[in-house]
Image (tube, rainbow, N blue to C red):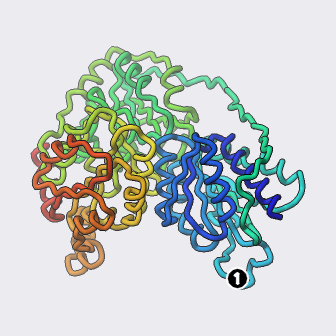
């Protein structure tokens, strides 16, 4: 039994490697013992394998998500049986909604312990239901040559499924009986026949674009970059581009701050396009999709998962990458396109910001070129979308699949673990509190991340929502002040702490060399922030 377990587990690991998996995140536990030990041995023998250990399963899931999101490749999670696997659920939810290829290796109790009151035992097969693209069960201890061949083939098949559009998570459930100790340091001849899954090429005949006024809306991008193709296309054809902060294509030639522009009524009839070609995921700005629908603007959606549109407004869904679309699209535009483009480019820029918003402009000015920045949801992502110009970097990431505030610290640390340059996280205090455990990875692996936390002592986004008009219950139910001492958090995880007296001081800190994680706090006030946003909008009008 032990020999079979050892042999088949090695085939499992080799099949994962042949599938392109190079990063493994392990959450320690008893039932996962044989796979964890053989994985550690495998990583020691193969320097392409990167192994991380995260004792908190929820943090581990988001740490893996951050790596997969940054590298655009599948990442494996290994956990033990019971509630431990259920802790991966939030990251699986985000991976499902954001099309991120997570591979969950869930070790399980054998069939004779199921539904019989055995400890650490829950129904794990297909635990995540519709959130995974496929869930398979593999019994590593079955003694039969067909089982080994099945492992070799099926593992590669389901991992390939995770990276086939629309991308998403998969689960491989692995029931194991005691004894769980594998045979280490044994020289096994492990040969896994690599399976090549060729992507069938279909030459799609693009519909002709013969319009007077064309506009591109570049939404959040979770695919390979189309930045160069978009720039060439837009400049050559005089096509204005509204670039979401997560499009990875925001430049000086693109339009940003569309939410403020619409709120300030700067988008008049002269700026109304005849056709909008929309790329990627749902934009950060809700107003821009409302505008398309209310003005009944003809809209095409171009994406490998095109047709996902909660506004139900798109007229054509073209399932291809934006890069292929831009490379193959030929236009016949009227001369009025030049004038139309110039009107969009002449729109005023939001330059006068205050307090919390000044953190965005300070970051915009101070960040080194090509820095990876991870953005928390709620206020940070909205302010970044409105005020960040992208003068120095387009490498902006966020968990915008399900838009949650859980796991953000861990996702940002996962990002920082696989990029060469020092990276940045912009977050609020509640979001940091939700994932404080994630900071243990910063301590254990000395990850080069600057965590900029805007501390307005509660949920700042709620001050902008209708529930703010219920003051009797607002603080208790929505404001939720936690009175967190950020320096104590930094001390707990042995992280360097800095407090900003003014946002402009951010530049000096970011320019100071450091090889570890730093926590940079800027204290703010929620009501003042609401008033500041109102005043900035009034000045912009």
Is residue 405 among what the camera can see?
Answer: no
Q: Nearer the viewer, residue 125 or 288?
A: 125
Can you say whether 331 is above or below 81 in the image? above
Residue 282: image x %, image y %? 43, 46
- Residue sticking out furthest to the bottom: 117
Residue for point 23% across, 76% down: 475
Q: Quadrant of the N terminus?
A: bottom right
Residue 97: image x %, image y %? 52, 53
Q: Is residue 333 left or right of residue 32?
A: left
Displayed quadrant of residue 177? bottom right
The kind of secondary structure element at disc 1 is: loop
Q: Nearer the viewer, residue 43 or 300?
A: 43
Q: Nearer the viewer, residue 159 or 350?
A: 159
Residue 359: image x %, image y %? 19, 49
Residue for point 64% across, 52% down: 41
Q: Nearer the viewer, residue 187 or 375?
A: 187
Residue for point 24% across, 63% down: 460
Q: Is residue 541 left or right of residue 497?
A: left
Can you say whether 473 is above or below 422 in the image? below
Q: Which residue is mark 1?
A: 118
Displayed quadrant of residue 370? top left
Q: Quadrant of the C terminus?
A: top left
Residue for point 22% across, 73% down: 483
Is residue 407 among what the camera can see?
Answer: yes
Can you say whether 312 is above or below 490 in the image? above
């Amino acid at each position: 039994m032990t020999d079979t377990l050892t042999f088949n587990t090695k085939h499992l690991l080799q099949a994962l490697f042949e599938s392109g998996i190079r990063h493994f995140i392990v959450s320690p536990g008893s039932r996962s013992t044989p796979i964890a030990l053989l994985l550690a041995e495998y990583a020691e023998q193969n320097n392409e394998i990167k192994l991380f250990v995260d004792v908190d399963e929820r943090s581990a899931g988001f740490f893996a998500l951050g790596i997969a999101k940054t590298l655009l490749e599948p990442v494996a999670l290994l956990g033990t049986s019971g509630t431990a696997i259920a802790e991966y659920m939030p990251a699986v939810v985000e991976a499902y909604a954001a099309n991120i290829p997570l591979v969950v290796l869930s070790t399980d109790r054998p069939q004779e312990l199921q539904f019989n009151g055995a400890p650490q035992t829950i129904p794990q097969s297909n635990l995540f239901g519709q959130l995974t693209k496929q869930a398979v069960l593999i019994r590593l201890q079955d003694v039969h040559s067909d089982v080994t061949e099945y492992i070799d083939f099926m593992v590669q098949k389901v991992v390939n499924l995770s990276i086939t559009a629309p991308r998403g998570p998969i689960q491989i459930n692995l029931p194991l009986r005691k004894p769980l100790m594998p045979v280490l340091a044994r020289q096994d001849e492990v040969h896994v026949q690599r399976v090549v899954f060729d992507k069938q090429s279909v030459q799609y005949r693009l519909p002709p674009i013969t319009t007077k006024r064309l506009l591109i809306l570049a939404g959040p991008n979770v695919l390979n970059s189309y930045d160069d193709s978009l720039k060439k296309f837009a400049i050559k054809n005089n096509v204005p581009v509204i670039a979401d902060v997560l499009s990875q294509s925001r430049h000086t030639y693109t339009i940003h701050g569309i939410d403020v522009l619409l709120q300030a009524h700067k988008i008049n009839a002269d700026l109304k396009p005849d056709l909008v070609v929309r790329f990627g995921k749902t934009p950060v700005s809700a107003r821009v999709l409302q505008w398309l629908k209310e003005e009944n603007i003809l809209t095409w959606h171009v994406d490998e998962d095109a047709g996902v549109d909660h506004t139900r407004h798109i007229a054509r869904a073209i399932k291809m990458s934006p890069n292929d679309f831009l490379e193959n699209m030929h236009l016949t535009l009227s001369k009025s396109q030049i004038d139309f483009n110039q009107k969009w480019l002449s729109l005023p820029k939001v330059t006068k910001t205050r307090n919390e918003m000044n953190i965005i402009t300070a970051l915009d000015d101070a960040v080194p070129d090509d820095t990876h920045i991870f953005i928390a949801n709620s206020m940070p992502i909205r302010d970044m979308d409105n005020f960040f110009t992208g003068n120095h970097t387009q490498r902006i990431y966020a968990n915008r699949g399900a838009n949650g505030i859980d796991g953000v610290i861990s996702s940002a640390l996962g990002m920082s673990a696989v990029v060469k340059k020092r990276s940045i996280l912009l977050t609020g205090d509640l979001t940091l509190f939700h994932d404080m455990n994630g900071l243990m990875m910063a301590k254990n692996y000395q990850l080069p991340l600057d965590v900029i936390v805007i501390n307005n002592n509660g949920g700042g986004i709620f001050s902008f929502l209708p529930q703010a008009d219920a003051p009797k219950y607002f603080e208790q139910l929505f404001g939720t002040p936690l009175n967190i001492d950020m320096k104590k958090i930094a001390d707990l995880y042995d992280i360097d702490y800095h407090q900003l007296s003014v946002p402009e001081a951010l530049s000096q800190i970011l320019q100071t060399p450091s090889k570890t994680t730093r926590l940079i706090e800027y204290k703010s006030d929620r009501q003042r922030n609401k008033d500041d946003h109102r005043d900035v909008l009034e000045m912009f009008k």
